[in-house]
Image (cartoon, coloured by chain):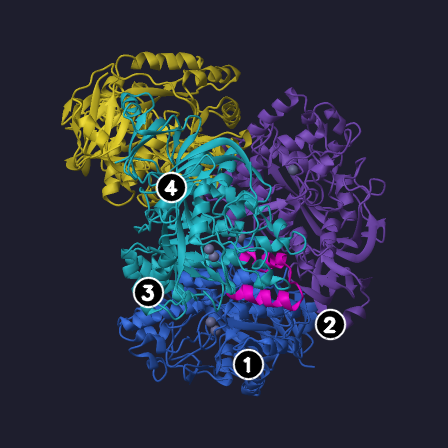
Chain colours: A purple, B yellow, C cyan, D blue
Amino acid sequence: MERTVISGGLVVTASEEVEADVLVEGERIAALALRGSETARSWAESGARTVDAAGHYVVPGGVDGHTHMEMPFGGTYSADTFETGTRAAAWGGTTTIVDFAVQGRGRSVRAGVDEWMAKAEGRCAIDYAFHAILSDVDESSLRETDALVDEGVTSFKLFMAYPGVFYSDDGQILRAMQRGASNGALTMVHAENGIAIDVLVEQALAEGRTDPRHHGEVRKALLESEATHRAVQLARVAGSPLYVVHVSAREAVEELVRARDMGLNVFGETCPQYLFLSTDNLAEPGFEGAKYVCSTPLRPREHQEHLWRALRTNDLSVVSTDHCPFCFSGQKDLGVGDFSKIPNGMPGVEHRMDLLHQAVVEGRIDRRRWIEIACATPARMFGLYPSKGTISPGADADIVVYDPRAEHVLSAATHHMNVDYSAYEGRRVTGRARTVLSRGRVVVDGGAYLGEAGHGRYVPRSTCQYLI
Amino acid sequence: MERTVISGGLVVTASEEVEADVLVEGERIAALALRGSETARSWAESGARTVDAAGHYVVPGGVDGHTHMEMPFGGTYSADTFETGTRAAAWGGTTTIVDFAVQGRGRSVRAGVDEWMAKAEGRCAIDYAFHAILSDVDESSLRETDALVDEGVTSFKLFMAYPGVFYSDDGQILRAMQRGASNGALTMVHAENGIAIDVLVEQALAEGRTDPRHHGEVRKALLESEATHRAVQLARVAGSPLYVVHVSAREAVEELVRARDMGLNVFGETCPQYLFLSTDNLAEPGFEGAKYVCSTPLRPREHQEHLWRALRTNDLSVVSTDHCPFCFSGQKDLGVGDFSKIPNGMPGVEHRMDLLHQAVVEGRIDRRRWIEIACATPARMFGLYPSKGTISPGADADIVVYDPRAEHVLSAATHHMNVDYSAYEGRRVTGRARTVLSRGRVVVDGGAYLGEAGHGRYVPRSTCQYLI
Amino acid sequence: MERTVISGGLVVTASEEVEADVLVEGERIAALALRGSETARSWAESGARTVDAAGHYVVPGGVDGHTHMEMPFGGTYSADTFETGTRAAAWGGTTTIVDFAVQGRGRSVRAGVDEWMAKAEGRCAIDYAFHAILSDVDESSLRETDALVDEGVTSFKLFMAYPGVFYSDDGQILRAMQRGASNGALTMVHAENGIAIDVLVEQALAEGRTDPRHHGEVRKALLESEATHRAVQLARVAGSPLYVVHVSAREAVEELVRARDMGLNVFGETCPQYLFLSTDNLAEPGFEGAKYVCSTPLRPREHQEHLWRALRTNDLSVVSTDHCPFCFSGQKDLGVGDFSKIPNGMPGVEHRMDLLHQAVVEGRIDRRRWIEIACATPARMFGLYPSKGTISPGADADIVVYDPRAEHVLSAATHHMNVDYSAYEGRRVTGRARTVLSRGRVVVDGGAYLGEAGHGRYVPRSTCQYLI
Amino acid sequence: MERTVISGGLVVTASEEVEADVLVEGERIAALALRGSETARSWAESGARTVDAAGHYVVPGGVDGHTHMEMPFGGTYSADTFETGTRAAAWGGTTTIVDFAVQGRGRSVRAGVDEWMAKAEGRCAIDYAFHAILSDVDESSLRETDALVDEGVTSFKLFMAYPGVFYSDDGQILRAMQRGASNGALTMVHAENGIAIDVLVEQALAEGRTDPRHHGEVRKALLESEATHRAVQLARVAGSPLYVVHVSAREAVEELVRARDMGLNVFGETCPQYLFLSTDNLAEPGFEGAKYVCSTPLRPREHQEHLWRALRTNDLSVVSTDHCPFCFSGQKDLGVGDFSKIPNGMPGVEHRMDLLHQAVVEGRIDRRRWIEIACATPARMFGLYPSKGTISPGADADIVVYDPRAEHVLSAATHHMNVDYSAYEGRRVTGRARTVLSRGRVVVDGGAYLGEAGHGRYVPRSTCQYLI
Ligand SMILES: [Zn+2]
Ligand SMILES: [Zn+2]
Ligand SMILES: [Zn+2]
Ligand SMILES: [Zn+2]
Ligand SMILES: [Zn+2]
Ligand SMILES: [Zn+2]
Ligand SMILES: [Zn+2]
Ligand SMILES: [Zn+2]
């Protein structure tokens, strides 16, 4: 079994900061030893391969709990394949993604999972797992979830938005939550009142308000918070946990606060775009705003401080990317003259770790919280812990040697995602993954990609580990 | 013009308690004069008819803002006609009702209003007005509401419950509220998440939980508060006022408190049944519980104190009856073996004033608040003030000489409603209307009914006077 | 008995707007009659004196529940005597004041009341009553309050600020509240944490921050809300009602909201200066800011909307003036170079009715609410209702014929208060008292003062009528 | 350097559960290795001493952040010396205490710290540190805190209770918090409104309500929550963190929730007595209730669920013991006939780990949370992390091999605290420390005490590591 020692770095996990060397045996972390201890010295002398981490952080690989590779939407597909998307993730220090397999209308959930398995198989640079999106909630699909949970697909997403596409009504949501309460599945919801929003969309278009910024105006914060509150109440009735994806509005955060103060198993996720971008971007001149069209939409700048605060108070627990890239040219432009036709989604899988480290640099969160929201909590939330999300004996050797002082500029010219623009074009950040190990293998090192499609494996998940 | 002096009583309105004599000229109140003043003495000597109110309260006739006479429901009709129902109201000191005209599915709103006008015409003992229930919310029906508002039907009710019957989805509710924001109409909602409730109903019946008490168990308080919150948020999006009918759950009250603390035009109504009855009644042995089946349902006893408190803090503003009687024998028994088939509704129009006076006797509210929630506020809320709901010069002479010391027992044996049971059978209360004037005419006096069908007139309403 | 008919106006009270004529017999209102009714016509023909109110409002005289005439403070006296101050009040349409008699340290409460009685006796243009300030809360002074309540001094004020002067500690406040719970007295508090504020004052002065604006900075909103919360909790422990004077901070309002949502007998007062002025005034150049020094202090402008909203939701119930004028020249200048030496207080008794009517003009409140917060509620709160605060048979004939269209400019050049500046210098307002009656006597009419010192009488008060 | 391997157990920390062996070199943890890994096998073969932990948990030694050994109170001393108290702690799996050095009135803070240092020196079985109680908050004592922080006394406790003894007024508290905001010290408060409580005590005694249960009745929950709110506001004004000791009332928890939802650095501690005992104990017959007299007092049983919930939501962060034992015979009986003379305090240092493990057994918290609230968080809160509170390379080898299945009965007959009663007499719990290491030395093993007075060392502390 190959042995690697990562030495000289500061090991940072969600709970510890330790000057320790890390011994990897094969694909797993075998041991941690205090720098300079007899044990550490013995490793140094054992002939094991050494990765020098002096002056660097040694952190768990990122876990991105929300991505959409090769996702069909509005007549096109998100631009990253599992191959290009997971490679970009690796470049950015993310070593696990949880993607969404979609149940087609009129088809079984399993067929969707199988289809996504097939798309990913043999293509991924890093490990991957799946949630499933339920498009037809009925007796048959809910029965399927029992077996899927046993096989490692332990969370199911429902949409309160997108009537006629992914939308589930409150009865379907309640039934899915009841099933989750019995089989251990975590219910995820996209919380926007899509029925009401579609009225506002229709009215906006009828009145000629067709620019990208109107996407943000019709999808009102109050209609996000309304749906969030509704999802919480349905979860209470069902006795089920709830995970609210891509929270963007302060009013929605307030609903999470209310729920969590009651001690409920209610969890919130936000994304870098909501923390760093705003309706100012949606209002960029011409059709530029289309680059920032996603749902829930970007919010006015003043919402950001509420999201950051909630990340500190743990009323928001996870930062995922909702990576769902569409090229500006050829895809986003489907919506010229009608914002409702712009494919919803933004690229981001490559930059999450760096943007959140930037928040450490700026004093918004501390280093441990960085790892917690980006690695440990998503791993626990989605049943991947402690294989993923931490550095401890027995964990998978998904490790990033992170240079906290490296400055670089985000740009479509240099990023590795398969999309023709960057939502953060020109933004300078401090901190960058230097060396990335995936299950013990170095896949990125010093600006070179050393991985290969197919190294990444499917990881069946256990159930959510956060339930009180 | 006939002149009547009501002398010697304590005039109690929502804001005053005055030892004054009241002069009625024809159908209206002409003047109030301090007892013993020259003016009062001159009236006594003028040969006007005198009603002696010594030792009594002189209060405005009650305004019951929520009744259902001859209402079709579940294949039958509510048992009181406009004739029997308004006569019973008069007996109990109520001199105005606002009933609900129902738009039939596939028909115009006006057709419903016309139909209800026809049913009431020439039959009523007291004055009456109409709200309309919107069953098909669409461009056409909303356009109709503009004219209806002008003609005195100024409030429209929408159901978040009863899918397939009265149910409107959130888009329809939003559109109706937007219309109300522009034409001045008040949007009323029945706030229960009917889509979710119907799932629980189906599950209860499938599991053999078919007794009346399960009606209360499936219609969960959380699903009332959820819908209440949702209605508030939709009203905020629309910029519209909101009136929530028959609030029964403390959690729903909390949503009203939140909304009202923000200064929103959100108003709540409760009913005597929620203040005096509870799930204990629904659980009475055999099929007895069916007598108490209404929606929103009765709640556990501990909710009552929250309703009373909200009545004191004005977070609940109105007490109406939701009078909708079905005979135990021949109607309620449609639901033997299946609680979902029990016609929803209870009798109550006759006892509201007395039950609320009982609350005065018990120290829960003071006399002025009694008149405020039972007379003045419903009159203002529904655009009937100051013709109705108060005693002041120019108001209609709808006046009750109320004996605050008369004890009596509520019972089907003695009540005047056309229904074979009383929800308050055997309950002793203190206080009773002795003399009731409707537009200057004595319709009840000392245990005799002196009115006639057809005395009561249709009253067109102006818009809600409570909007801030 | 002299008879006066006020005819042709719109009678506006806290609850009604009626086209009625008002008959005054002697000092009281005898009757109201519908305009054009036989009764009204008979008055017109009876030879009674007529006041023509056509095109005007006929409203109750204002009740200012918080004034300080000839009040000793910081080595000087507030500049209005009972003679000048009540005359100015009359000019502005206020016909009753409740002033604060001060218990001197080491003296009895009664001695203070007697002293204030003597100051007012024979000097007042309008009726007056007294609260008492407790400076020494002990067994002896609390025992005194029992008799004082019986004699019409039914409310006692305690200071959580001004250590060493008026300050009472929490034990004293608790004891006073317990006594109030037993003898019916209303406890009023000045809610600021004076102990903490004095630390900040000392620090500010030590650091050379001596300008008037620092008065506002050290008396922090959080220290007002803290004291407000504390007063509420002490009142809950004592089972006593609570009236919080001169609320200025939104955070303090939030504490009132919390308390009132619980159904507690907690009431808040604010003043025109907090509604119309702000820290911008305190920061006026040179020593100008001293004109606006009062405690609680003016707050940043954004607090105003919260106060207005609370006035609409009734979380603030009363607007008084806290009239306590000190001349800019010779009094305010005691604090040049040391803001803590500036006498605390502002003139205002003359302008309250007009400033609040301005809020009607601007759509912040409606007419009835204007009368409610300025007349009816203070009258009820302090046991003067229905003699004062309304227009109904039996009430004192304290009546204002108010011209809602008269424009005028507030200025020291034209005001009648005995102080050399106006806090509202140059402000244009719409609406003005044209004719003012005090107990049936015209004291102001069409720009002429017709009253006399000594017309005003002491009014003993009953206990607070707002207790639930 | 001596090497010890703890093998075969489940290592449980606040964030991980790992099947790993732990290598101790000298006084510190050198390494963790996956069970069965080459590294672990090499240790087994290296001749190191082995502690067999098969079937056991391997957890960090407990950190009790709140004890009072040899504490003078009401004319007597708490019954445990540093020798007996720390020995009992070790028996119960606690390996660090933070005790309170008391500044005597009129003396320097340092003199108090020196005195406590001297009491502890050479006597302790386990490591110890100190907070200081400030009895005289003035310029001089606050200046002292700068140096004390540098020397490892980084938190200072202030009392809002006990006027005339430890009480600080709000100005003193504000000044102390300001100093903490500048020198990094954590301000701890005993949050009860002692001024108001003393009024109620006096009244109770005057009325003959002298039994122990009246101790609980006069120290009202509202007066705890009031003081908690006040401390939070003062901390906001000062820009300082706040740690509220021994929170017992649900209302106080609600204040913490409010503060923490704002993102403030406000932290709450509770104690096992509030989680497991109630006013039922205070009301035990005769003078038995005196055993349970402590302040804040025990609360009615229904408060417990709120404390448990807050422990899950992290609105309460730490469970300490407030260990302050007084013998029933000879100490508690000072208060026969006058509850206010009963020495305040209860024994508990020995049972905290077991009682909290019992909560794991009963499903109230999970294992990681057990370690978090009992070990990791107090260590971080008080600047002892990562030396104390976790198991990771470089940490002190304070390790407990815990048998999760051992049942035993708490009793004065078997406990090791120097006090003649147990507050939990007869209570059966599951789980017990089998082997306890303090800095690498086995001090308890299999029912034998192997430690010695003086092994324990003083640990200077860094500042609070929880500040956001
Ligand atoms: Zn997504
Ligand atoms: Zn409220
Ligand atoms: Zn109804
Ligand atoms: Zn004051
Ligand atoms: Zn004042
Ligand atoms: Zn304490
Ligand atoms: Zn919270
Ligand atoms: Zn203590």
- Image side of residue C22 versus residue A117, left or right: left
- Image side of residue B353 versus residue D240, left or right: left
- The residue nearer to you, when weighing D463 against C429, is C429
CB at disc 3 and ligand 4 closer than 8 Å: no
Q: Are marks 2 and 4 in contact (CB under 8 Å)?
A: no
Q: Are marks 3 and 4 in contact (CB under 8 Å)?
A: no
Q: Report the residue at 33% width, 51% height from top.
A: C458
Query: Alpha-carbon distance for marks 1 and 2?
Result: 25 Å
Tell me the tag on residue A145. none
Could you tell me which secondary element the residue under label 3 belongs to?
Answer: helix
Please give the residue where the numbered disc 3 appears in the rendered image. Answer: C142
- Image side of residue B463 versus residue B359, left or right: right
Q: Are marks 3 and 1 on the same chain?
A: no
Tell me the tag on residue D443. 1
Q: Are marks 2 and 4 on the same chain?
A: no
- The residue nearer to you, when weighing A306 against B264, is B264
